[in-house]
Amino acid sequence: MNIIYDLGGVVFNWQPEKLIKKLFDDESERKLIADNLFFHPDWIEMDRGTLLTEEAINRSFIRTGIEKKRIKMSLDSVPNALTLNKETVDIIKETKKNGHNLYVLSNMHIDFANFLTDNYDFWELFSGIEFSCFVKMIKPDKSIFNYILEKYSLEKNETIFIDDSEANIKTAKEIGIKTVHFTTPEKCTADLKKIGAI
């Protein structure tokens, strides 16, 4: 069996609202930075690798009036806010021990992707790692799912996709990939047991 893992919200905890609250004391600024950076369409383009960090900062500054250095500080704070979910890593190790081929498929900005690959040592457990920023495609578009299937010659009916996003899960199902909608490590473990992966 092939198992494809998402990263943010699955392997790494990602709580942007909590980070914004930590970075900005003023409630109006929190809303501005949320709406015009973290939850703005530009974030998707950064993940896709089609919008450079400097340009994203400039655009956010124009929309919000918040100083560029503070916007940059917000982006620089993201990698350390991606804290490791050790229980998910245990699941990864268990599925690897059971003989499955493991892969990563993650929407990720290039700076964040490089930080994670440089600072964690479990990547050797995976047979392939695909970040949206490097392939210029992004979930939930079907193209990125078809890309990883074709690149590694994965059969849809022999592949499980694990993600916390309902939209991403929906697309994977439409393609014919088995799915596990991640909410907690405990539920993920139970779902994988039902499938017979662990």
Image (cartoon, grey):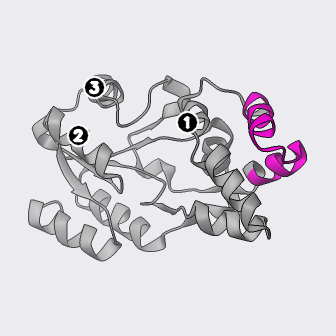
Where's the C terminus, which quadrant? bottom left
Is residue 61 magenta-colored? Answer: yes
For label 2, the SS is helix
Q: Please tell me whether residue 56 is drawn above or below residue 112 in the rendered image.
A: above
**104 vs 71, nearest the viewer:** 71
Check disc 1 and give the amino acid type. Pro
Q: Residue at x 77, y 65 (%)?
A: 23
Rendering quarter of residue 21: bottom right
Question: Based on the displayed image, in which of its 4 quarters is residue 88 positioned?
Answer: bottom left
Q: Dot 2 surroundings within 10 Å: few (below 14), some, or many (20 or more)?
A: many
Range covered by the magenta-colored residues: 55-74
Is 70 left or right of 143, judged from the image as shown? right
- Circle 1 sits on which residue? 41
Where residue 176 sits: x, y (%)? 13, 36
* Disc 2 + disc 1, Cβ < 8 Å: no
- Relative to 43, is 136 above or below? above
- Distance CA(mark 1)–CA(mark 3): 23 Å
Is tag 3's residue or tag 2's residue first in the polypeptide sequence?
Answer: 3
The residue labelled by disc 2 is 172
The residue under the point 35% across, 52% down is 165
Tag 2: amino acid: Ala
Of pointers 1 and 3, the one earlier in the residue sequence: 1
What amino acid does circle 3 point to?
A: Asn
